[in-house]
Amino acid sequence: MPRRLRLALPGVPLHVVQRGVNRQACFLDGQDKQRYLDYLRSCLALAPCQLHAYVVMSNHVHLLLSTQSTVFLSSLMKMLNQRYVQYFNWRYGRTGSLWEGRYKSCLVQEERYLLICQRYIELNPVRAGIVALPGQYCWSSYRSNAQGKLDDLVSPHSLYLTLGRDVSERQEKYQALFQDELGERCIGQLREAVNAEFAVGDQAFLRRLAEMRR
């Protein structure tokens, strides 16, 4: 059965998830996570994509990107995954696959779900019980978006920029968003959307995409 084509709308963000094969660990320590981010940086310089949020966990990665075409996204992920697998296999003396098939992605309606998706991504280490606060985790975009840590991987989305008149106000408003927990229904919607490789958004947005997919 042929694979269903990925949906993409110019400039509409995509939530991308890449998991290790059989959900096994593909990042064994901080050096692995940092190497992946270094490769991500170099690949972003070659593919026309903008990264708004990310987190690198032990057995999977979340990326929130904007691009004009799934062709650019596919190019980015192919380069990134190949480089990291070569490094990982060399470091640990192994061969074969590391990733669980192709990456999953879903469109994210900006107005209602972009900042929710960013929070979902950056709260992964908290939900996993690794840290108590998102700022305590080194391998995510939270420190950049909420605390102003220099991170040249991150390109703030235009919706994020509307949070405040200057950098300080935007960071303060962004931190305030994390005072409200993401409900289980919301988390379920985000997970279901990416697993189905479709979209998260209001009913009008989803109907529009469903018509495009026919």
Image (cartoon, helix red, strand yellow):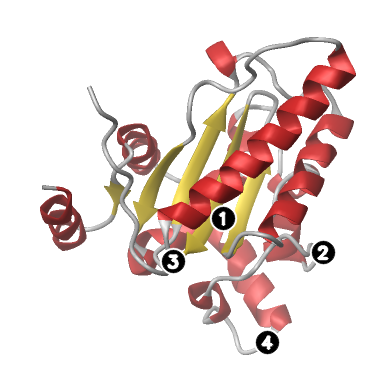
Q: Which residue is mark 1?
A: 179
For mark 2, does the 10 Å Cα neighbourhood hold few (<14), some (14 to 19), or many (20 or more) residues?
Answer: few
Whether pointer 1 and pointer 2 mark residues with C-beta atoms closer than 8 Å, the reply is: no
Label 3 vs 2, first from the N-terminus: 3
Position of residue 120 measured from the top left corner of the image (x, y, whole percent): 51, 46
Distance Cα–Cα, label 3 vs label 2: 28 Å
Q: Nearer the viewer, mark 1 or mark 2?
A: 2
What amino acid does circle 1 point to?
Answer: Gln
What amino acid does circle 4 point to?
Answer: Asp
Whether pointer 3 and pointer 1 mark residues with C-beta atoms closer than 8 Å, the reply is: no
Q: Is residue 204 above or below residue 3?
A: below
Left or right: residue 59 versus residue 16 is right
Q: Nearer the viewer, mark 1 or mark 4?
A: 4
Q: Is residue 70 above or below residue 94?
A: below
For mark 4, does the 10 Å Cα neighbourhood hold few (<14), some (14 to 19), or many (20 or more) residues?
Answer: few
Label 4 vs 2, first from the N-terminus: 2
Distance Cα–Cα, label 3 vs label 4: 28 Å
What amino acid does circle 3 point to?
Answer: Gln
Label 3 vs 4, first from the N-terminus: 3
Q: Which residue is mark 2?
A: 149
Which residue extends farthest bottom? Answer: 165
Residue 181 visible? The answer is: no
For residue 68, which numbered disc appears in the image?
Answer: 3
What is the secondary structure assignment of the residue under circle 4? Answer: loop
